[in-house]
Each structure stands twice: as structure tokens, then as C-alpha cells.
Image (tube, rainbow, N blue to C red):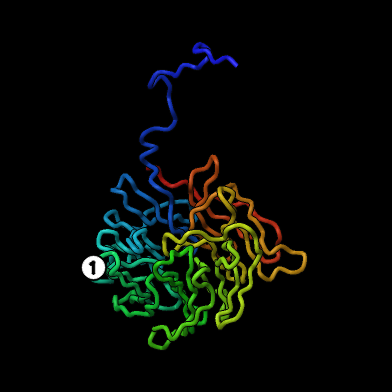
Amino acid sequence: MNHSPAARSTPRAFRAWTSDITAATVACQDGTPGWVSLVGDEVWWDEPRPHEAGRRCVVRATPAGEVEDVLPADFDARNGLHEYGGRSWRPTADGLVFTHWHDQRLYVHCPDGQDEPRPLTPTRKNVTYGDLYVPPSRDEVWAVRETRSGGVRDVERALVAVSLSTGTERTIAATHRFMTCPRMSPDGRHLSWLGWNHPNMPWDGTELCVAPLRADGTAGVHGIRAGGPTESVVQAEWRDADTLWAVTDPDGWWNLHLVPARGGPARVIAPAEEEFGGALWKPGTSWFAPLPDGRAVAIHGTGAGRQISVVDPDAGPGLPALTPLDLPYTDFVQSVDADTGRLVAVGAGPTLPYDVFTAAVPPLGLDHGLRGTARPDAPGC
């Protein structure tokens, strides 16, 4: 091989060539689209706005392909829960409830009306809310409330409910130093949440708690249904009134399990040496979403080789419990939502930037994947 100076390529002079990557293109990208939700026939998500002081704006795409802001320009859907921030908004019957970064309060807003967002909670410098969840058929939002009374060690957290009409607040449960993932059972008789205590990190050991939901809207005595000091549950959702889906790692891999709500051994679904979960840095993160027919859609894989599959715990003999969807993406943001026939997530590939997309979900009993359909391009920065 010739290593002489003459044989080496000479770098071209600065600005002697034209790049398609402009400064404006670089400045336009500040993170990825975040939390996603299917809202009727619309798709909602939040996205970074580096050209608007770095705020996160909730937007929606209509069936006609139009993309429009849901939040007014002065509002920023973020919070400081667990320092990294948690799920910051959820759709409601007539709009959304969200946390505003500048005062950490809860607000409600109807994007189709003329009024500005209305605050639900009072101004308190030491209180933040995050990991929002709107239980079906209840006029309230559930959230993790974080109260700082001094230094970094003087922090209290509780699951609370805040009325979407009056802002009245009540404590549902306060069991652990760290809490996340409050959920109500489909019949409204129980609730679940995840909790863990210092010095554990959420990938070390967490507990899946289930308790009766009393008539006054508070939790009764809870039982631990999965997890422990050396087992980490990172997401749990109700499948029906008696069973929960849970991502947990008793064998060292975060796999999907079915967990009896009233106690008993969990059953792993489609066990594999790959991850169906990950580090729970942000409360409200979701790696899977239940489907109304008892199945689920799940993000899984290792490294940069991830995919989304339909998971069927009741697949019959000879049928796979895991059916990968034919999608062009190899990595995904940790947020996914689904309903009958479709899902929404944020994906990227070797030549595809992170973007929101929808995909068809095959009907129950169909054992092959369907190619995803990307949403219309968002407006340029």
C-alpha cells in the first residue's frame, strides 16, 4: 500500500462544497416527538420547538392530514417530576389536561374553544405534577405529585386525583419514595401503581401494587403482585378486571407477563432474550399498549434492532404469540398507543429520522404483519 503524502487525499477547502445539511436544519431538530395518543380519529403528540424558546407543544393531525397546534404559544407541556420529567399531558373529553413548565401547575384546555388554558392547581414553588393519567368515566386526572420541603433528600411523592372541573385535590396513595404508573381497573374497583424506595433505581427493583379503590376515591390496603428488591417492573396496564399486563424481569430480561390482580404466579408471554422494556427514566414511559380484544402491541428487541409486534397470550396451538409488524423502523421512542385496528408510535431507521407514524394492527387471528402507514409530514420549522 502506498502511504506517500502524494497518495493521500487532500481535504477540500472550507466552503468549497455544498451540504444539504444546513444550519437551519440542525437548529430545527431538538430532540424527538414525545408522548403520543390516539384521540378519536385524530393523532396527537408533543414535539420540541427550539425556535420557540425550546417549549414542547402538543399538536394534532386530522384525518385530512392537517397538522395544528393544540396548545397556545405561551404554554410549554413539560414538568420536572423525578428531575427528568414525566408524562406531561393527556387527552380529555373536550381537550386536554397538561402540566406547564414555567409554574409546574396542572391546566385544562379546549383547543376548539376561545378561552386560554385554565389552571387547576394553585401556584406553589415546591410542588410539581407529572405522569398524568385520565381514568375512564371519571371527571379527574390522576398524577404523581412531588413536594420538596428542603434539600434533594426532603422530597415526598404521592398519587393524587385532581378534579377537571373544580381543581379539588385528594391523595389516593403514598406508599413509596418513588411512584409511577397509576391505573384504574376496567370495572373501577381496583387501582394499580409502581413504587420503589431509595437506594434502588427503577431498573434494580420496583413493586407492582394493587389495591381496592374505596368509595371515597382513595386506595385501600395494597398487595404486591410482582417485582421486589431485585426484580424490576417498569410498566403495568390492566388487561381486564382480573389481570394486568406487566413488563418485568425475574429472569434478567424485561419480558411481557400476565399478572393476576388478586395474587398468584405471573405468566410470561413469548419469552425471549430481548427487552420489552428499559430504564424508567421518565415516569409515564410506555413500551406496550393493550388492545381492546385482549392482545397488546409492544416495542421489543436489543440494541438498534427493535421492532413492534402484536402479542397474543391466547394464541392457539401452532400460532405465534408474537407477530412482528412489517415496519421500516429499527428504533422507537418509548411511547405507544393503540386501539382497535391501529397504533401510533415514534420510529426511526438508518435513513429515517424520528417521526410520528400510524400502523394497521392485524385483526385477531390473522398471523401476518401489515405495513405501517406514516402520518403526514409535520410543518417545517
Image point (51%, 70%), residue name? 236
Quarter holding residue 274: bottom right
Q: Residue 326's spot in the image, x, y percent? A: 64, 51
Q: Amino acid at mark 1?
A: Gly
Identify the residue at the far top of this view: 6
Q: In the rendered image, is residue 115 in sight?
A: no
Q: Position of residue 57 (x, y in %)?
A: 35, 54
Is 65 situated above or below 97?
A: above
The C terminus: image quadrant? top left
Question: Residue at 53% across / 68% down in the picture?
Answer: 231
Regarding mark 1 in the picture, which secondary structure is present there?
loop
Q: How many marks?
A: 1
Report the side of 165 relative to 59 (left or right): left
Residue 3 at what x, y percent from top left? 54, 15
**Residue to which mark 1 is pinned:** 150
**Towards the viewer: 349 or 195:** 195
Q: Position of residue 230 (x, y in %)?
A: 51, 68
Give left or right: position of 197 versus 373.
Answer: left
| Closer to the camera in the image, 240 or 257 | 257
Q: Quadrant of residue 379?
A: top left
